[in-house]
């Protein structure tokens, strides 16, 4: 039997208890969706190969020119971090890569820093361990294609006929489509 002196918890507490787990679950998939919706389109040059996923079918795993670090584009403060003797496997350094288009409209990395540029188009990535290669996460590494079209795409890429169209929004990058 309920004591009449007990107070009921306000409705907002119940709503808060429901909203917090829902927010945590939806946060991860919302970033790529927001990037595709509001992001600025950039064209990237690629170097793919053609694997196959047993459950999802053909996909093209892509490598991008913006993943390789050109030491001439690295800021002095980031260069000190990269040259640190204590860096080892498992260490991560967060970096911000400023992108600018060339004459043909392909975006290239023009500056790599440990702080984002104010008005620039930039992508957030990580340098892991002692490697001098930038990892931009899963949204840039695979692109699923129609069944039995992966080999055709790979052949076109070998001839330099493939460009990836990605969207960049607040430092996040997501592949949108591939052009041949």
Image (cartoon, rainbow, N blue to C red):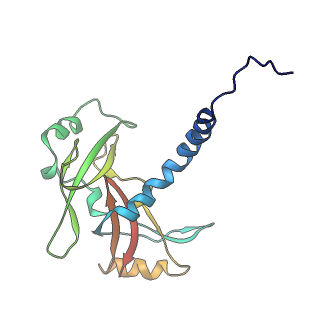
In the rendered image, is residue 82 in sight? yes
Residue 63, visible in the rendered structure: no
- The quadrant holding residue 18 is top right
Q: Picture coordinates of residue 128 (x, y %)?
A: 35, 43
Image coordinates of residue 157 in percent, x first then y, are 35, 77
Residue 122 relative to residue 143: left or right: left
Left or right: residue 92 versus residue 142 is left
Residue 63 sits above or below residue 95 on the image: below
Q: Residue at x 50, y 69 (%)?
A: 51
Q: Is residue 99 above or below residue 28?
A: below
The image shows residue 4, relative to residue 112, as above or below, that is: above
Which residue appears farthest toward the front when viewing the image? 4
Q: Quadrant of the N terminus?
A: top right
Q: Give residue 27's position: percent from left, percent from top.
A: 49, 48
Residue 49's quadrant in the figure? bottom left
* Depth order, front residue of 161/94: 94
User: Which of the pair 128/41 is nearer the observer?
Assistant: 41
Residue at screen point 34% across, 71% down: 165
Rendering coords of residue 36 (x, y %)? 40, 64
Q: In the displayed image of the protein, which residue is found farthest to the right?
A: 1
The image quarter containing residue 92 is: top left
- Residue lying at 18% horizontally and 76% vertically, measured from the top left: 104
């Amino acid at each position: 039997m309920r004591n009449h002196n007990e107070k009921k918890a306000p409705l907002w507490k119940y709503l808060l208890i429901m909203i917090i787990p829902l927010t945590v679950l939806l946060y991860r998939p919302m970033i790529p969706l927001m990037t595709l919706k509001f992001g600025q389109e950039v064209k990237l040059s690629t170097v793919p190969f053609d694997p196959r996923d047993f459950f999802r079918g053909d996909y093209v795993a892509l490598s991008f020119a913006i993943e390789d670090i050109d030491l001439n584009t690295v800021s002095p403060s980031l260069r000190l971090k990269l040259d640190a003797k204590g860096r080892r496997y498992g260490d991560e350094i967060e970096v911000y890569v400023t992108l600018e288009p060339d004459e043909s409209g392909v975006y290239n990395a023009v500056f790599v820093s440990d702080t984002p540029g104010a008005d620039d188009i930039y992508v957030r990535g990580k340098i892991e361990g002692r490697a001098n290669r930038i990892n931009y996460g899963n949204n840039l590494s695979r692109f699923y294609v129609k069944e039995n079209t992966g080999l055709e795409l790979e052949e076109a890429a070998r001839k330099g006929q493939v460009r990836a169209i990605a969207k960049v929004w607040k430092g996040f990058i997501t592949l949108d489509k591939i052009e041949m």
